[in-house]
Amino acid sequence: MEERFLTVNVVTPDGLVYDHHARIVVAKTISGEIGIMPRHAPIIAPLVIDEVRVKRLDSDTHVDWIAVNGGIMEVRDDVVSIIADSAERERDIDVSRAERAKIRAEKMIEAAQAQEDVDQLRRATVALHRAINRINVSKHG
């Protein structure tokens, strides 16, 4: 019996960020973490800002980590497609840039709280979450 596997691709407006074969993909949807294996039922699920883990086919210990800033995951016929505003593999993350973005977001949160600006607070909180996610994913590299 032939071994089944997943084809995983992550696409952003800038193009294809990731395209590999995998045994399992773990992502965080708005209703919680989900693991996708071959023969998974077709689904479409909105993703939150979090890391996506891909256990590669080429080695039992090879896991790729991708920082995904929300988006949509579609699973169909052993193909996992993630469409996101932005996504970066752990090896491509500029950690010092992410650290600076985190500091900027923290300052924006303080200013928004002082001014009681709810919209600015929401935007700054999302920016902070994105920066922290990128920093966390970079540590897997």
Image (cartoon, grey):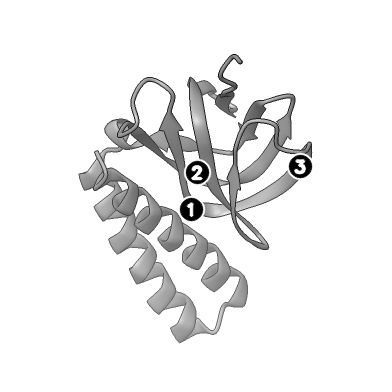
Q: How far is the residue under mark 2 from the one under mark 3?
A: 16 Å
Left or right: where 123 falls relative to 57:
right
Give the labeled residue for mark 1. Answer: 50
| Image quadrant in which the N terminus is located | top right
Left or right: where 94 falls relative to 56:
left
Which residue is painted at 70% across and 49% down in the image? 46
Label disc, if present, on residue 44 of the rendered structure: 3
Task: Specify the quadrant of the image occupied by residue 15.
Answer: top right
Q: Judge the density around disc 1: few (<14), some (14-19), many (≥20) Cα neighbours within 10 Å.
A: many
Which residue is painted at 36% across and 58% down in the image? 132
Q: Judge the density around disc 2: few (<14), some (14-19), many (≥20) Cα neighbours within 10 Å.
A: many
**Amino acid type assigned to the residue bearing label 1 in the image:** Asp
Question: Foreground: 108 or 34?
Answer: 34
Measured from the top left, where is residue 84 in percent x and y? 60, 38
Measured from the top left, where is residue 73 in percent x and y? 67, 39
Give the labeled residue for mark 2. Answer: 68
Q: Which is more N-terminal, label 3 or label 2? A: 3
123 is higher (above) or lower (below) than 45 = below
**Amino acid type assigned to the residue bearing label 2 in the image:** Val
Q: How far is the residue under mark 1 from the one under mark 2?
A: 6 Å
Left or right: where 102 falls relative to 118:
left
